[in-house]
Image (cartoon, grey):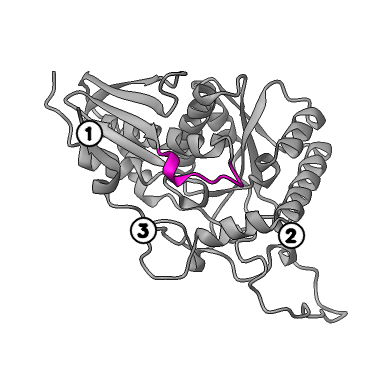
């Protein structure tokens, strides 16, 4: 058996995972040959995510990032997804089973952990290669997760309508807005939450795009009228990112962890190819719009993540991370 890994380094990589509102809802315990991953209910989002589905997906991404870091360090890894009725917050065990030669792909994916950032700004007017989408689809399938590009016009219209409706409902809900403001950070170097500099300053509704990103500054902008274009001004370029929908056959914590693992793999593969992504989860936040998406798209299974992807026009803004000492607990 190889020497015990440096769990501090592994957890540092795992915690680079994206999480809803950057809540970082995870805890870890490291022992000689395994890393246990737990959901931390103290960092819950009771309004936006009352079932903890989205936060458990975030923990699943952290599980995958830990496995990627271990393989790049030359270790063989097995992941067991373990949530049960007695211990539902114990989500997964990442077990080291031996040594292996790290491949160039292992090292590239591990390097992508630090390079990945959520990109809420507009993308360049360049298409995502269809071959890459096919590859992402195959990789997600290895985790029992299906991935579809929302490309048919009728599907796009249906999803866009649900997304816009969900954003409207959320903006009109005082408890949602209070929870959102709780996780928006204005102080430099905050260890969690969404830094205000990572949020586009313009109202997302004014962006020439079919896909409405979440408005983190709802109610905080100074009211004003949008600029009136001249008659001879060319029409604005409409952003058309690639939009991917990930889903699972089941809809329990095990399925959510697997969805997160597949999402982590998709994000790292895209980052290694020079792409960036951000979530479009409003229509999945609420049971009614999530159910309607399932019905209107005739999905076989449960939608878990909607993701916009494209070529970043500018570098993303790095978000803070809690110190490893806060999330890595001693074993026993």
Distance in Å between CA atoms under marks 2 and 1: 43 Å
Is residue 17 in view from this perspective?
A: yes
- Residue 118 located within the stretch drawn in magenta: no
Q: Nearer the viewer, mark 3 or mark 1?
A: 3
Q: Which mark is residue 238?
A: 2
Residue 32 found in image quarter: top left
Quadrant occupied by the N terminus: top left
What is the crowding at mark 1: few (fewer than 14 residues within 10 Å), some, or many (at least 20)?
A: some
* Quarter of image, res 137: top right
Q: Mark 3 to mark 2: distance in Å?
A: 35 Å
> Which residue is disc 1 drawn over?
73
Residue under label 3, please give it: 191
Q: Secondary structure at mark 3?
A: loop
The picture places residue 162, in percent across and down from the top left corner, at 78, 44
SS at mark 2 in the image = loop
The stretch of residues the image draws in magenta is 40-49
């Amino acid at each position: 058996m190889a020497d015990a890994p440096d769990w501090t380094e592994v957890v540092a990589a795992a915690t680079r995972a994206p999480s809803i509102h950057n809540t970082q809802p995870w805890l870890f315990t490291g022992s000689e040959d395994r890393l246990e991953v737990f959901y931390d209910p103290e960092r819950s989002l009771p309004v936006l995510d009352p079932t903890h589905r989205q936060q458990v997906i975030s923990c699943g991404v952290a599980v995958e990032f830990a496995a990627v870091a271990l393989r790049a360090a030359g270790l063989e890894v097995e992941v067991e997804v373990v949530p049960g009725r007695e211990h539902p917050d114990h989500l997964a065990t990442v077990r080291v089973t031996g040594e292996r030669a790290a491949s160039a792909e292992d090292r590239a994916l591990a390097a992508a952990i630090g390079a990945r950032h959520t990109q809420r700004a507009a993308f360049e007017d360049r298409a995502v290669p269809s071959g890459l989408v096919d590859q992402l689809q195959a990789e997600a399938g290895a985790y029992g997760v299906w991935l579809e590009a929302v490309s048919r016009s009728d599907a796009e219209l249906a999803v866009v309508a649900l997304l816009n409706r969900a954003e409207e409902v959320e903006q009109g809900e005082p408890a949602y807005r209070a929870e959102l403001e709780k996780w928006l950070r204005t102080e430099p170097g905050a260890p969690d939450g969404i830094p205000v500099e990572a949020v586009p300053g313009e109202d997302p509704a004014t962006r020439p795009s079919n896909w409405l990103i979440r408005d983190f500054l709802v109610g905080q902008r100074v009211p004003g009228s949008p600029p009136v274009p001249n008659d001879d001004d060319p029409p604005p370029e409409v952003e058309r990112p690639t939009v991917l929908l990930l889903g699972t056959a089941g809809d329990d914590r095990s399925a959510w962890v697997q969805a997160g693992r597949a999402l982590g793999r998709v994000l790292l593969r895209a980052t290694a190819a020079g792409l960036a992504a951000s979530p479009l989860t409003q229509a999945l936040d609420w049971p009614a719009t999530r159910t309607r998406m399932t019905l209107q798209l005739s999905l076989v299974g449960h939608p878990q993540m909607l993701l916009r992807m494209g070529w970043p026009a500018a570098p993303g803004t790095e978000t803070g991370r809690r110190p490893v000492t806060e999330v890595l607990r001693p074993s026993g």
